[in-house]
Amino acid sequence: MIERRRFPRSRVFKSAKLVVPGQAKVPCIVRDLSAKGAGLQLHGGADLPEEFDLCFDTGQRIRQCRMVWRNVMFAGVSFEPAARGMA
């Protein structure tokens, strides 16, 4: 398989939650991680928006994300600058 990522990722197995305002938190597993993005293993076919927050640990680390690709069980996200959505 050809690696197409611009930034190498480390394999991990971390519990996290996708946080979408006005919706329930969606649990997931972070399978690979870099400073610029992550690969997520999803638990089913949740309907996710283009942008959401990814909450690590017990809510102490939150990253703003943009969906890059997705299939039924996995998704690739890029981390957005912290100022997204602020005027």
Image: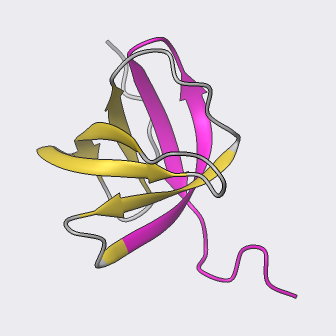
* Image quarter hosting the C terminus: bottom right
Q: What residue is at 59 percent from the left and 52 percent from the top? A: 20
Q: Position of residue 21 (x, y in %)?
A: 64, 58
Q: Is 80 left or right of 87, judged from the image as shown? A: left
The relative height of residue 24 versus residue 1 in the rendered view (above or below) is below
Q: Residue furthest bottom?
A: 87
Quarter of the view holding residue 5: top left
Q: Position of residue 13 (x, y in %)?
A: 11, 42
Q: Is 66 left or right of 46, judged from the image as shown? A: right
The relative height of residue 71 versus residue 11 in the rendered view (above or below) is above
Q: What residue is at 15 percent from the left and 48 percent from the top? A: 14
78 in magenta: yes
Q: Position of residue 75 (x, y in %)?
A: 46, 29
Q: What residue is at 61 percent from the left and 75 percent from the top? A: 81
The relative height of residue 73 versus residue 46 in the rendered view (above or below) is above
57 in magenta: no
In depth, the one of 77 and 34 nearer the eye is 77
Q: Position of residue 44 (x, y in %)?
A: 40, 16
Q: Is 22 left or right of 64, judged from the image as shown? A: right
Number of numbered discs:
0
In depth, the one of 61 and 2 nearer the eye is 61
* Image quarter hosting the N terminus: top left
Q: Residue furthest right?
A: 87
In depth, the one of 59 and 67 nearer the eye is 59
Q: Is 17 left or right of 30, judged from the image as shown? A: right
Chain part drawn in magenta = 62-87
In depth, the one of 10 and 40 nearer the eye is 40
Question: Which colour assignment does the render follow?
Answer: secondary structure
For the question of whether residue 71 can be seen, the reply is yes
